[in-house]
Image (cartoon, coloured by chain):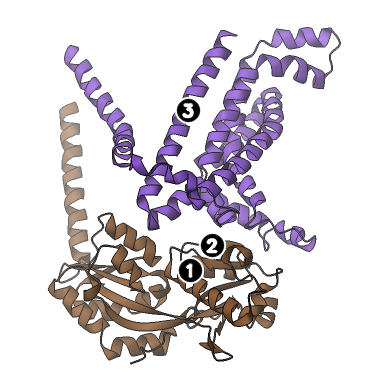
């Protein structure tokens, strides 16, 4: 009696597993391949919105891992094997152990002063020297993230332009650091930070934020800085090559510029 | 019978390997020749200072708040005690980052109580106070649960005798209960301190991470991992040695309390 019961359970389990397997195969993509993309968090909105196009171009399913280019590079260096790496700047490409000669520039983004739309800070913080006021809760990307490096360059430039009587040091100004650009923006949206320095492209698809691009020059001296985004292939498979061709095409960069607030490369 | 025992031993060895292999890996790969650099590394030394400052304050608060709570719980009715214990245990089973979001929701500038604090000119997020509160949130349950079980199993006849001798409830607690359970309180405090030192998720969410201000050792390890993984490993080894020290400290403490 017991043996019959066990047999019945086994048969039911086998049938259930078979059905599950059938169900899974029916949801698989037609080509049964996938491309894994590691990308800077500042590209997350754009890439997520363009997933269908990327799927069509590559003929494969697309999966993402977003984060600071620095931490993604550390992950690759530690052994992760994505198919493509979209980074802000090439420092992280070098840090990841990939060949920087294979990297191709796509678009750029300027650093901007970002506040919550309609907040007091959005009216009063409109230039870099406004950051000197201690009343603002200011967030910067960590120095390990490209947006943090860029912020440090701009603050150094501001010190040069506005005179050394002002302390534009990171520790003097910032209340906190975030590991990537997206994390900073979340804190502004939550109202925990008044102002952050991050990419101007952040405001294109987020109506809750106000971006004031830091001008490239002030009084004839360098102030604002830009970050260039690169795509680096990690393997030479046909689907990766197809995606690389698409991502370095004018069509792709125009989409990023028109719909997601990035800037075209200066030729 | 013998075969069963051997298979169990094999499983036990596997279980030990699961814990030991990563630690061994860390100790083998760490660049020992660079360990001295940790002392002169700004990030590591500042993080060590912040960690010691905040974790010791958090542990003191754990003892000040947690021991009376444990005593109250041990004297409460079963229903109240069960409810209180469930509530106190929540931070232990909660992912720390959820704890950070909870703290931000309550005490952030736009939080339920944080709005009121902001009107008084008090802003807690991204401060060392926020680090302490995060550590307190995750560490206090360890002390409360350890001490409460000791309070419940202690000889209640001594408390009755103290009452008969004219001791009030507060004096009984401070002059009779605490000296009798000193070992458990210290063990609970060490556990809470160790948890506070290792706190990461709640702190980075509620207090952020800024060098020499709110960045503690686990956050420094996380940051160093991106730019100097060898030093990150070195700092990790320091934390493992600290953890082993805590375990030995607890062991001797528990043995002492057992002998008392």
Q: Residues within 10 Å of mark 3 (few under 14, many from 20)?
A: few
Query: Disc number at residue B45?
Result: none
Q: Are marks 1 and 3 in contact (CB under 8 Å)?
A: no
Q: Are marks 1 and 2 on the same chain?
A: yes
**Whether residue B44 is situated above or below residue A212 in the rendered picture:** above
Near-viewer residue (B59 or B159)? B59
Q: Are marks 1 and 2 in contact (CB under 8 Å)?
A: yes
Q: Quadrant of the N terminus of chain B?
A: top left
The residue wearing badge 2 is A177
In the visual, does B207 lie left or right of A264? right
- Residue A93 position within the rendered picture, expressed as x and y whole percent measured from the top left: 30, 68
Q: Quadrant of the C terminus of chain B?
A: top right
The residue located at (39%, 48%) in the rendering is B231
Residue B6 percent location from the top left of the image: 20, 18
Whether A40 is drawn above or below A222: the answer is above
**Residue B186 seen in render:** yes
Residue at 56%, 13% (x, y): give it.
B256
Indicate which disc, 1 or 2, sits on the residue closer to the N terminus.
1
Q: Name the spot of residue B149 as percent of width and height, x first.
A: 59, 22
SS for callout 3 = helix
> How far is mark 2 from mark 3, CA to CA?
32 Å
Cβ atoms under marks 2 and 3 closer than 8 Å:
no
Q: Label the purple chain with its letter.
A: B
Chain that appears brown: A
At 42% from the left and 73% from the top, the residue drawn is A42
Which quarter of the picture shows residue A2?
Answer: top left
Question: Would you say residue A192 is visible in this rendering?
Answer: no
Chain under label 2? A
In the image, which disc is placed on residue B245? 3
Same-subunit check for callouts 1 and 3: no
Residue B244 horizontal/vertical position (percent): 44, 29
Q: Chain of mark 1?
A: A
């Amino acid at each position: 009696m017991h043996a019959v019961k066990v047999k019945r359970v086994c048969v039911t389990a086998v049938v259930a597993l078979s059905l599950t397997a059938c169900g899974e195969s029916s949801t698989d993509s037609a080509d049964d391949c996938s491309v894994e993309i590691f990308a800077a968090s500042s590209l997350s909105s754009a890439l997520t919105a363009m997933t269908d196009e990327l799927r069509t171009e590559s003929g494969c399913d697309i999966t993402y891992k977003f984060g600071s280019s620095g931490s993604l590079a550390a992950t690759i260096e530690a052994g992760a094997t994505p198919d493509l790496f979209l980074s802000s700047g090439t420092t992280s490409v070098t840090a990841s152990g990939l060949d920087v000669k294979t990297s191709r520039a796509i678009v750029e983004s300027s650093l901007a002063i970002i506040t919550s739309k309609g907040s007091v800070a959005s009216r009063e913080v409109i230039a870099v020297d406004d950051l000197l006021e201690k009343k603002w809760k200011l967030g910067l990307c960590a120095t390990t993230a490209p947006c943090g490096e860029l912020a440090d360059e701009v603050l150094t430039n501001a010190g040069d332009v506005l005179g050394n009587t002002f302390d534009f040091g990171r520790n003097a100004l910032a209340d906190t650091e975030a590991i990537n650009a997206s994390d900073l923006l979340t804190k502004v949206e939550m109202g925990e930070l008044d102002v952050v320095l991050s990419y101007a492209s952040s405001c294109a698809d987020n109506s809750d934020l106000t971006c004031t691009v830091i001008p490239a020059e002030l009084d004839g001296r360098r102030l604002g800085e830009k970050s260039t985004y690169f795509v680096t292939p990690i393997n030479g498979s046909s689907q990766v090559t197809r995606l690389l061709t698409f991502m370095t095409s004018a069509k792709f960069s125009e989409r990023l510029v028109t719909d997601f607030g990035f800037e075209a490369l200066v030729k | 019978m013998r075969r069963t025992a051997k298979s169990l031993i094999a499983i036990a060895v596997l279980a030990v390997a699961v814990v030991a292999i990563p630690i061994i890996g860390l100790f083998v790969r760490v660049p020992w020749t660079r360990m001295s650099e940790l002392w002169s590394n700004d990030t590591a030394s500042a993080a060590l200072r912040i960690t010691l400052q905040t974790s010791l304050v958090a542990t003191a608060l754990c003892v000040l708040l947690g021991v009376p709570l444990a005593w109250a719980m041990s004297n409460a009715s079963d229903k109240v005690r069960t409810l209180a214990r469930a509530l106190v245990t929540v931070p232990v089973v909660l992912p720390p980052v959820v704890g950070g979001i909870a703290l931000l929701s309550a005490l952030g500038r736009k939080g339920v109580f944080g709005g009121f604090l902001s009107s008084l000119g008090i802003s807690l997020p991204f401060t060392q106070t926020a680090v302490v509160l995060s550590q307190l949130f995750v560490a206090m349950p360890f002390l409360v649960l350890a001490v409460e079980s000791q309070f419940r199993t202690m000889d209640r006849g001594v408390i009755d005798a103290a009452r008969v001798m004219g001791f009030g409830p507060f004096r009984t607690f401070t002059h009779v209960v605490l000296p009798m359970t000193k070992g458990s309180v210290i063990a609970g405090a060490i556990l809470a301190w160790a948890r506070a030192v290792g706190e990461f998720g709640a702190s980075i969410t509620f207090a952020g991470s800024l060098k020499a201000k709110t960045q503690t050792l686990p956050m420094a390890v996380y940051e160093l991992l991106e730019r100097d993984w060898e030093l990150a490993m070195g700092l990790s080894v320091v934390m493992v040695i600290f953890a082993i020290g805590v375990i030995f400290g607890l062991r001797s403490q528990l043995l002492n309390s057992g002998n008392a």
